[in-house]
Amino acid sequence: MIAKLLVVLIVLSWIYWLIACYCTWRFFREQARPAREYLPPVSILKPVKGLDFSARENWASFMRQDCPTYEVLFGVADPSDVAIAEIEGVRRAFPEVDVRLVMASAKGANPKVAILQTLADASRYEVLVVSDSDVRVAPDYLRRVVAPLADEGLGMVTCPYRGAAPLTLTARLEALYIGVTFLPSVMVARQYLDMRFALGATMALRREDLTRAGGFAAVADCLADDYQLGAAIAATGKRVALSDYMVSIHLGPTTFREQWDREVRWARCASVSRPLEYPALWLTYSTALGVILVLVLGSGALAWAPLGVSLLLRWAVGWWVTGYTGEEDLRRWLIWLPLRDMLSALVWFAGATGRRVVWRGERYIVRADGRMEPVPRRERVSLARR
């Protein structure tokens, strides 16, 4: 009985990946068209804590935008943050760009949202573009991301992203996950589950729509702030659109501990945001399901054939998807995809069974409703001593 169930799940998983591949192909084929000429003044909001890999180069890319009027606001919460000196360096290097450093105060459990609230209050323009600190873009980024907001029925534009410059094995595994697992899944969700969410790498929206959705204060205690903000915009009756512009997340030399903490946090974001759909993620784990079938049945063609087909299909889909997205360089790491898929299955279990996350070195407890709170200081000290 267990073996039959596993075979059914594996076959459904094959169907899923073929659908995901088709959705990815269709999206990038249909979206490859010139952007409309709509470019109002823009405020770029960048919450910062510490220094990411190649931070200065990432931030400098936002100073070279082909946009007539925009400002870049960096926000930090700690006056002693090492990022401040680098931000000042970028400001001096680009005197022609309106760059400001804003000190933020705590306004909720989510430190990123607390900074965004302060930045939004300090910004000058009606259109806001939220961008993570590890993002790097090309000069046409603002034009392509903001252009769809010419449609008044659209409340938010968000961007897919790729993992760039992976310098260690763990970083390459993360880039593989982003490029050939996460991104195709986003395309399926966009096509069949309604685009009612956002991706934190970029969120472009009007100030009036943000206010109507409750502002950043509405997600001040939420772990999955980007997802919840997109849902709040959609709840106002306006649409959330996925841009065809892919931003780059420069990974650099990440460690396994960093990768694990980050991916478990992502998994717990998914588990609290879409709890009914979270178990269905097992349809994306063809490799893990095939391995479990081998462990159940042992030797024999019936045990090994589904695993072999799963591996071939995942490699094929990875090859096709990287072609659709222009990430051919990622193909050199596809040999590691089986290991990547098994790691994803382990991350799923961690996301389903725990309530703690680590974010930028800080520990938080996630409640069942998706709200987060810092681990009490005395408990952090106790954990550090173990």
Image (spheres, rainbow, N blue to C red):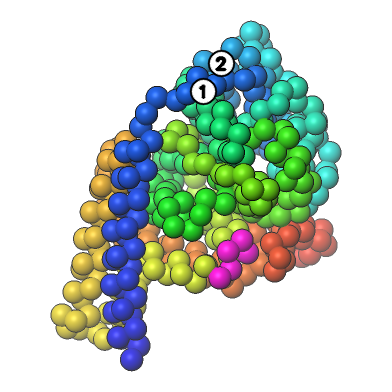
Q: Amino acid at mark 2?
A: Cys
Q: Amino acid at mark 1?
A: Arg
Residue occupying image coordinates x 83% and y 43%: 106
* Residue 71 seen from this side: yes
Residue occupying image coordinates x 67% and y 64%: 356
Q: Is residue 78 above or below residue 281?
A: above
- Crowding near the residue tagged with mark 2, few <14, some 14–19, many ≥20 C-alpha atoms within 10 Å: some
Q: Is residue 313 above or below residue 62?
A: below
- According to the image, label 1 marks what residue? 143
Residue occupying image coordinates x 45% and y 66%: 281
Residue 282 found in image quarter: bottom left
Residue occupying image coordinates x 52% and y 31%: 148
- According to the image, label 2 marks what residue? 67
Predominant SS along the magenta part = loop
Q: Quadrant of the N terminus?
A: bottom left
Q: Find out whether the residues at labels 2 and 1 contact each other: C-beta distance under 8 Å.
A: yes
